[in-house]
Image (spheres, helix red, strand yellow):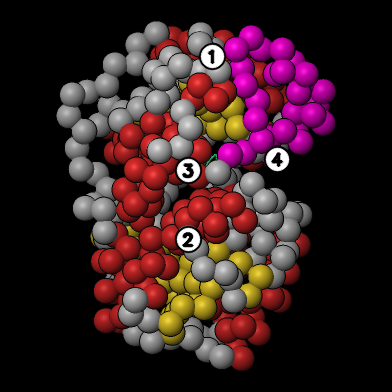
């Protein structure tokens, strides 16, 4: 059996790592890297650290306006699928790369499988939500990480080919947490375990307007502890463009870094007092690590982390952040929300059986 897996950015590399391992023991995988993330710290480092094989096709598309990126990706992926059609095309998550892979597979009449299917924020203005909805509706096999994801699909009339397999990011966390724990600790950044906050911010809603960036800077200024903020290139670029970068640099105790690798990020997470983020993946990783999460959005796809009391929706609101930081207590029990740690194995089984 042959699978074409299509990846292109940071969270997809993390998701592909365990699944690629599981697949390659039983099937032939052709890996396509669109190049949506191309900076070394957002791409190459992930391939090295996570042991992802060299891509068979590196399209090198790079950043750009989403429509242009989508068109270029379709132009790049199309011939790969038509020249040597695989049994199934595998796409991950909710990015332009996901949508391009899904459209290319559907238009060439190939079977499409979506990893992390059924996630919804119910905000159709989010590019990620558009990508998820279209991809799910085109998919033949839908691999859901949670029960909520299965219910979301059911509400949209999608019941065939739906498999609740667990979360491949949980698999990745279990695979790499020990290696990460052996990395140098937070003292390398002059921080003490259990005392600092860890931040990530990259969504369009948080970075695409001056008003949103001012809210972000106000949040940085409201932090009550030293903090580590590996800044996504898009966020840095936007802050610089609005003349707000220097203001962020002046926040006492705030360490502004370029994005760090998955292992260093996981290491930093394991010892953090709390995480503040607008990332989907980081909300879950905070839960895996048992670290309180404040989500800088008004909604989340990972509702079960909120229901379990491990995650709070505080929006990009300095007052709400300050208040939430004053009470970070977590429940005693951490429920099993994301499967048994072998979502990749379960996904590979279904793929092999279904081809
Ligand atoms: N991550 C990382 N380095 C960083 C920030 C995040 O390795 O400096 C990892 C993080 O551990 C998670 C993934 O990047 O696995 C999340 O990616 P991102 O926030 O870009 O995407 P989202 O999850 O929101 O789709």
Precedes in sequence: disc 2 or disc 1: 2
Tell us which disc is closer to us: 1 or 3.
3
Question: Image check: 11 left or right of 147?
Answer: right
Task: Determine crowd level at label 2: few under 14, some 14-19, many 20+ residues with C-alpha closer than 10 A.
Answer: some
Q: Secondary structure at mark 2?
A: loop
Q: Secondary structure at mark 3?
A: helix
Residue to which mark 2 is pinned: 51
Residue to which mark 4 is pinned: 234
Residue 295 location (% of width, % of height): 46, 29
Precedes in sequence: disc 1 or disc 4: 1
Precedes in sequence: disc 1 or disc 3: 1
Asked whether disc 2 touches disc 3, contact meaning CB atoms under 8 Å apart, the reply is no
Residue drawn at point x = 39 percent, y = 75 percent: 24
Question: Image check: 90 left or right of 347?
Answer: right
Q: Which residues are magenta?
A: 233-260
Task: Place residue 254 in its image quadrant.
Answer: top right
Q: Is residue 127 magenta?
A: no
């Amino acid at each position: 059996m042959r699978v074409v897996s299509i990846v292109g950015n940071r969270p997809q590399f993390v998701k592909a790592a365990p699944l690629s391992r599981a697949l390659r023991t039983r099937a032939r995988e052709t890996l396509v890297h669109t190049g949506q993330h191309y900076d070394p710290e957002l791409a190459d480092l992930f391939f090295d650290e996570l042991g992802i094989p060299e891509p068979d096709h590196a399209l090198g598309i790079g950043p750009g306006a989403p429509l242009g990126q989508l068109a270029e990706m379709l132009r790049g992926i199309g011939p790969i699928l038509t020249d040597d059609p695989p049994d199934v095309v595998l796409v991950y998550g909710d990015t332009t790369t996901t949508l391009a892979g899904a459209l290319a597979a559907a238009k060439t009449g190939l079977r499409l499988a979506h990893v992390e299917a059924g996630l919804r924020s119910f905000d159709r203005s989010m590019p990620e939500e558009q990508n998820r909805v279209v991809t799910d509706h085109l998919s033949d096999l839908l691999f859901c990480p949670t029960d909520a994801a299965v219910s979301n699909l059911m509400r949209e009339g999608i019941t065939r080919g739906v498999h609740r397999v667990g979360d491949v990011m949980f698999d990745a966390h279990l695979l790499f947490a020990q290696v990460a724990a052996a990395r140098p600790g937070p003292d390398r950044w002059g921080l003490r375990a259990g005392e600092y906050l860890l931040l990530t911010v990259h969504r369009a809603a948080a970075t695409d307007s001056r008003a949103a960036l001012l809210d972000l800077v106000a949040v940085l200024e409201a932090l009550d502890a030293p903090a580590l903020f590996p800044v996504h290139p898009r966020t840095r670029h936007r802050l610089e463009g609005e003349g707000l970068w220097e203001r962020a640099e002046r926040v006492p105790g705030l360490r502004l870094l370029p994005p760090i690798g998955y292992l260093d990020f996981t290491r930093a997470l394991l010892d953090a007092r709390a995480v503040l983020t607008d990332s989907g993946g980081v909300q879950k990783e905070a839960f895996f690590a048992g670290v309180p999460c404040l989500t800088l959005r008004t909604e989340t796809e990972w509702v079960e982390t909120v229901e379990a009391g491990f995650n709070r929706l505080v929006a990009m609101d300095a007052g709400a952040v300050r208040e939430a930081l004053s009470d970070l207590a977590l429940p005693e029990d951490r429920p099993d929300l994301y499967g048994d740690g072998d979502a990749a194995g379960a996904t590979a089984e279904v793929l092999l059986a279904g081809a």
